[in-house]
Image (spheres, grey):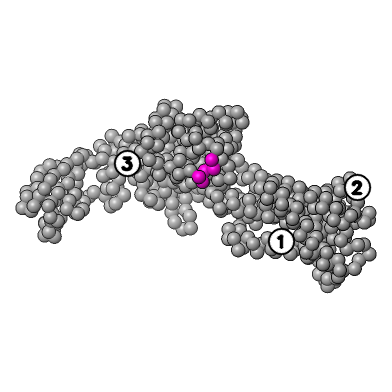
Amino acid sequence: MSLLVILTMLPMLLHLFLSIPLSNIITLDLRYLNWAAPGIWATSSGLLAFCVAILRMKKIKYDSGELDALLKTPLRNGEIIFSVIIIGTILGFIQALISIALTVLLNNEYLGFWQILLILLQLIPLINFYAVLGALLGIFVKDGIVLVSTILLIFLLLSLSIGSFLPLADFPANYVNVVNKFPLTEIIESCQMIIQNGTITYVGTFLTFLINIFLVLLTIAISYKTFRK
Amino acid sequence: MEASITLKAVGKTFKNNILLADLSFGVEKGSTFVLLGENGAGKSVVLKLLVGLIEKDAGKAYIQGKDISTRGEEIRSLTGYMPQSLDLDNELTVLENLEIFGRLHGLSATDANKNSLEWAERLDFGINLNQAPDTLSNGNKRLVQFARALVHDPEVIILDEPTTGLDPHSRTKVWDVLDKLHQHKTIIFTTQNFAEAERYADRIAILHHGNIKMDGTLERLIETTHGLTRYRISFSERPPAEFMDKLKTFPRILRPQVKGLELEFYSRERKHFFKVLELALKYDLEDIDTSLCRLHDLFVGLTDGGFE
């Protein structure tokens, strides 16, 4: 029940406290609230996937002694890590569905089945990226303050730095040149293009997918150094 | 007899501390082996190493002929391990904790459920099956951990101080179970309780500073003391320092020490005891007690500087 409240509240609060105030400041060709909807989807689903993964990994490794219990079963390190990533990704995916449904309702916009499917295709690697990142950082984050700071940092990066709520055109040119090369920026741009019926690319999706594979392998390699001492 | 567990020159260092130094021993199939040692001697390290919770730096270790470094998953499906610390998942019920372990060790859902219920009944915690572990007493948590180590019917049972924190009734239950299992399973356990080690282990190893000081059956270990006897003389008043000074000059009187009103020492020959007695009679002597060396005496002698 509490999870359902969070899944509903997160996109609604982003809409209320970021999209609505910014819609009075930022003027775009497209209605701002519609333009910022992909930001809500990406921020809420990415943040949730990250939080679930980092908290789960921290709990397993440091808080509950569960890791020792799991390590004496025939499970491989990779399977333990995958379980964390999968639960983060699934919950992030559910969050994305709820966020899409809520923004459609709040903005009175219409998204067809194919548009939603394309959006989800773009968002899944992003959600997975944050779940993998959460699992990786969860191996190292032992302290509560560091955990909160990390989540806050991820929230700021997700919401404000890659064109989710603030158009990149308003940032310095040098910064934009760099950020535009990030696959996650391309994913958000593609989502914004989907609702405008514009041209979309899958380069960001594909690159994020490759980065995810690399990060999973890195996490497994690190686990062999840190799980069994 | 076929070895179930074999360690060959195993070494482990952690943060510049030598935990295990060139450790070698073997445990025969179907036998019960106990590791005794002071706190920090490396007993838990050996067990954790066997189940793959920590990795060795040197040497070879095998369980049922399988190298623990290369066939860890197979070995963990053969072993049931009960750690010293409480590590039950408090987000699950007791039953779920047992079932999930059975499932992770390859049991079907039906078998995992059946075995979990059987163990709960056998160890008398059936009433707690639907509770979260953090609502149980520490003793009951230990019983659940014990059941969890056995739920998948492992070939090799590895128990780290299994009866610590248990009341006498629960201890009996645990040993009754192990007594029945020990005919066809290999059991290795650690304990601080010498009576348990003497009673239940086929072989005893005394670990000191990460290496085995002595290893064998109880009879064999006692034999090595060559008839060493412990003497206790009680006084009505603490014996004066001059008595102790004189005693130290006596040959073949080993480890003399005063504990309260009691003098304790070891000797191999009666005549040396009689000399001490002659001296003690000059003071206010109350009682005399003699006993042949047992495991506890041997352990103290070996780990605390020896008898000589």
Q: Amino acid at mark 2?
A: Gly
Secondary element at image label 3: helix
x and y, in percent, of residue A94 in the image? 76, 47
Q: On the same chain: label 1 and label 2?
A: yes
Secondary element at image label 2: loop
Per the rendering, the mark at residue A154 is 1
Structural distance between the alpha carbons of marks 2 and 3: 75 Å
Q: Amino acid at mark 3?
A: Phe
At horizontal 20% and vertical 42% (from top left) the residue drawn is: B228
Per the rendering, the mark at residue A112 is 2
Q: Residue furthest bottom?
A: A172
Magenta stretch in the rendered image: B131-135
Above or below for A13 versus B78: below
Q: Is residue A131 left or right of residue B68?
A: right
Within the magenta stretch, is there residue A12?
no
Chain letter of the residue beneath label 3 in the structure image:
B
At horizontal 82% and vertical 67% (from top left) the residue drawn is: A21
At horizontal 29% and vertical 38% (from top left) the residue drawn is: B221
Q: Amino acid at mark 1?
A: Ile
Q: Label 3: which residue?
A: B194
Structural distance between the alpha carbons of marks 1 and 2: 31 Å
Mark 1 / mark 2, whichever is N-terminal = 2
Q: Is residue B229 visible?
A: yes
